[in-house]
Amino acid sequence: MEAILTILVFLFILIVLVLAHELGHFATAKLSGVKVEEFGIGFPPRLVAFKRGETVYSLNAVPLGGFTKMAGEEDPSHPRSLASQKRPTRILILCAGSLMNLILPFLLFTIALMVPHEVPFGEVVVTGVSPDSPAAQAGLAEGDVFLSINGRPINNTVDLSRNVALNLGQEVTFEIKKADGTTGTAKLVPRWQPPPEQGAMGVGISMPEVTWVRQSEPFWQAIPDGFTTSVETFVLYKNEILKWFIGASAPAVVGPVGIAQMTGEVIQGGLSPLLQFAAFLSLSLGIINLFPLPALDGGRIAFVVLEWLRRGKRIDPKKEGLVHLIGFILLIAVILLVTYNDIIRIASGGSPIP
């Protein structure tokens, strides 16, 4: 029964995120006068479909995506094709899906903050300091308690880790309670590339005593907090991607099966963590789709930019279509490989959540 619930919740979240993405493409295409031939949830074969106006609306059997099929996506010969539009319009239509996925977390985080949820409270205590680390140079010592960072209270280890990750490479100011009960400040710069097992600051931390408090925010407070959380989460994604490029960390890749497993683990925390998880997935979907890879929105945008660099000279539509087809096949192959690894990990009792 638990497995069925996990699958149903996972599919519901996926459909919501895909629907938001495709509605972005659909709405901007319609407003721009581009002919939308089909708006589909899931991938063929079709289960049900109906036609309204010039557009077919379909529900398909493979619930792992969706599509907005526009006339002449690579061929400008059709007068109402996507390819016949001006470059800014094409880029807007192609970006609109990801923009919707980047906006949706604001709503999800806002609702998550209004839903009653359990929050841990407790002193975050330094259990060790690595030699020559930023923490050691700032004078932190075992037994110190973190009270705030840049004026923001630290109520648990998540508060500390999140705010440190938001400020990599930037000086932060901590308010500290020393072992003798006195308070003071410590300034340090969290590292992008710390030595193994040290972390950005070079400290070990713990929460010796934890008190769980049930919280919910009124909507007038949840709205600005939801916006702040969305922006900060985007910054965390940006920082994580930068760490990939500088070799500080490697991407943790999971496929549909892995995400479904994560959904089952998050469900245990209730509705609020589940909404936050959906927000993270939405941001991931929006960002990844903008990568300049064939078959993704970013890959199609790259062809528009290439056309601009070639002073209006287009790539042959058949060649562009072939590139996207090959990219789609490779994408499916990667998803299958990642799914295989997910199944092996589940069979061995592992979890994608560290």
Image (cartoon, rainbow, N blue to C red):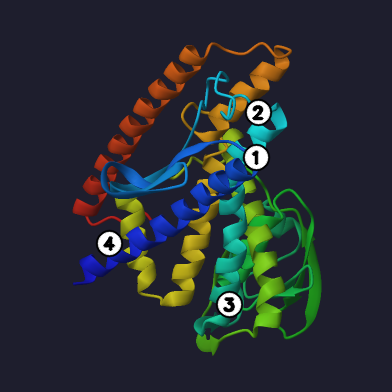
User: Residue 7 bears which disc, if any?
Assistant: 4
Query: Which residue in the structure is indicated by mark 1?
Result: 32
Q: In the rendered view, would you say 314 is above or below 12?
A: above
Residue 330 position within the rendered picture, expressed as x and y whole percent measured from the top left:
36, 26
User: Residue 113 bears which disc, if any?
Assistant: 3
Callout 4–callout 2 Cβ contact below 8 Å? no
Q: Quadrant of the C terminus?
A: bottom left
For the residues carrying marks 4 and 1, which lies nearer the camera in this image? 1
Q: Residues within 10 Å of mark 1 (few under 14, many from 20)?
A: some
Which of the marked residues, 4 or 2, is nearer the chain's N terminus? 4
Q: Considering the numbered disc 3 on the image, is that residue within a helix, a strand or a loop?
A: helix
Which of the marked residues, 4 or 1, is nearer the chain's N terminus? 4
* CA separation in Å, label 2 and label 1: 8 Å
User: Residue 85 bears which disc, if any?
Assistant: 2
Q: Considering the numbered disc 2 on the image, is that residue within a helix, a strand or a loop?
A: loop
User: Residue 81 bears which disc, if any?
Assistant: none
Residue 206 position within the rendered picture, expressed as x and y whole percent measured from the top left:
53, 72
Callout 1–callout 3 Cβ contact below 8 Å? no
For the residues carrying marks 3 and 2, which lies nearer the camera in this image? 2
Q: Considering the numbered disc 1 on the image, is that residue within a helix, a strand or a loop?
A: loop
308 vs 284, nearest the viewer: 308
Q: Residues within 10 Å of mark 3 (few under 14, many from 20)?
A: many
Under mark 2, the amino acid is Gln
Q: Residues within 10 Å of mark 4 (few under 14, many from 20)?
A: some
For the residues carrying marks 1 and 3, which lies nearer the camera in this image? 1
The residue under the point 47% across, 46% down is 53
Under mark 1, the amino acid is Ser
Callout 2–callout 1 Cβ contact below 8 Å? yes
Q: Considering the numbered disc 4 on the image, is that residue within a helix, a strand or a loop?
A: helix
Callout 4–callout 1 Cβ contact below 8 Å? no
Which of the marked residues, 4 or 3, is nearer the chain's N terminus? 4
